[in-house]
Image (cartoon, rainbow, N blue to C red):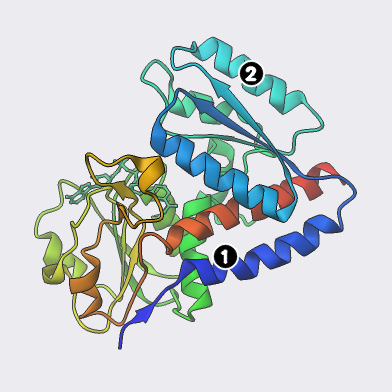
């Protein structure tokens, strides 16, 4: 029988601990979420983060800017938040409009407020396996999910599909640091199914619905689906909760073969949010020293 790696259950446990921690703090940790434009997916993710934040008792400021904001203006806004002692964490909801250089924007966030762990300083720390930085929330969510279900990474082979600077590469580094032997696949990879089948753990972050079918997996594997895809023609905000969001894995056919699988929704996503707020509480403690 396949084991379902249920991220909601794990998130509930983390939420309980965060509520207890936050209730004992002198002030509320304060997160600023920066959104540019009105992309519905971004709005949905931000709503989820706000809801979780409210439930655990932190303060959230949703700083919303027009689609056409200039890079100079956005950078100056971030610098203001960096200099504001009442702000403990800052995240920028990605993707950003084309006129904005994402790397430059992310690197403007002060490393000690970069609770998404995506700035160069935190990336360098991850590269050097220095535990001092903030762990990128998605990679952290995958690791917590595996840890909770007692699936070790040390000594295991891991195949990651996706090499983006924001998801795939962070995942690869996190698994490598945890002692796995890691292979990264992407659009140019030849014979993908031959590679994916060899792994103990397959982590998929391609943003391609239904990419992983039964021909890519074998019995005994663990499959973690990081993808979040809204099927075309559906109204995201209205349809969420009715399972109109899908991952990168053809869930039913893959689940009938492998040992364990994470669903979408309800797998990695809830833990990405939980990790973000764990980082925020750490940032608060750092600023309160
Ligand atoms: P991206 O488009 O920047 O990168 C996708 C990567 O997948 C690329 O490296 C590409 O080469 C590879 N890829 C795409 N199609 C492929 C194919 N057919 N075969 C092999 N490789 C393929 O996307 P991203 O920002 O890295 O996000 C990936 C997915 O993860 C998206 O669905 C996104 O919504 C999701 N995501 C989920 C969470 C979460 O919390 N669960 C967080 C962030 C992103």
Q: In the displayed structure, would residue 194 be above or below residue 78?
A: below
Among numbered discs 1 and 2, the one appearing first in the sequence:
1
* Residues at marks 1 and 2, CA–CA distance in whole angstroms: 32 Å
Q: In the displayed structure, would residue 63 be above or below residue 280?
A: above
Single out the residue that lies furthest toward the right: 26
* SS class, disc 1: helix
What's the mark number on residue 102? none
Q: Residue at x 61, y 48 (%)?
A: 51
Single out the residue that lies furthest toward the bottom: 1
**Horizontal arrangement in the rendering, residue 191 relative to residue 287 (left or right):** left
Q: For this rendering, which residue is in front, 85 or 61?
A: 61
Q: Residue at x 64, y 66 (%)?
A: 14
Residue under numbered circle 1: 11
* SS class, disc 2: helix
**Horizontal arrangement in the rendering, residue 277 relative to residue 124 (left or right):** right
Q: Quadrant of the N terminus?
A: bottom left
What x and y, as percent, mark residue 184? 28, 56
Q: Residue at x 59, y 57 (%)?
A: 274
Q: For this rendering, which residue is in front, 235 or 155?
A: 235
């Amino acid at each position: 029988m396949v084991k379902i790696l249920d991220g909601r259950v794990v998130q509930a446990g983390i939420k309980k601990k965060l509520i207890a921690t936050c209730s004992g703090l002198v002030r509320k940790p304060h997160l600023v979420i920066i959104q540019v434009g009105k992309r519905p997916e971004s709005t949905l993710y931000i709503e989820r983060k706000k809801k979780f934040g409210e439930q655990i008792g932190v303060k959230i400021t949703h700083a919303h800017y027009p689609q056409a904001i200039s890079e100079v203006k956005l950078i100056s806004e971030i610098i203001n938040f960096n200099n504001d002692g009442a702000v403990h964490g800052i995240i920028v909801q990605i993707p950003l409009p084309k006129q904005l250089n994402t790397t430059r924007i992310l690197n403007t966030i002060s490393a000690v407020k970069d609770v998404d762990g995506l700035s160069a300083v935190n990336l360098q720390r991850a590269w050097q396996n220095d535990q001092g930085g903030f762990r990128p929330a998605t990679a952290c969510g995958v690791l917590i999910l595996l840890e909770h279900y007692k699936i070790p990474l040390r000594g295991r082979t891991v195949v990651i599909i996706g090499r983006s600077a924001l998801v795939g590469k962070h995942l690869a580094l996190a698994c490598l640091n945890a002692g796995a032997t890691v292979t990264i696949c992407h659009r140019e990879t030849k014979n993908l199914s031959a590679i994916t089948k060899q792994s103990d753990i397959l982590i998929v972050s391609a943003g391609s619905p239904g990419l992983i079918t039964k021909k890519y997996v074998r019995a005994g594997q663990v499959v973690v689906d990081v993808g979040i895809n809204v099927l075309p023609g559906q109204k995201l905000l209205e349809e969420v909760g009715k399972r109109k969001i899908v991952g990168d894995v053809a869930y039913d056919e893959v689940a009938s073969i492998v040992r364990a699988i994470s669903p979408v929704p309800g797998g990695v996503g809830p833990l990405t949010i939980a990790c973000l707020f764990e980082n925020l509480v750490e940032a608060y403690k750092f600023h309160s020293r």
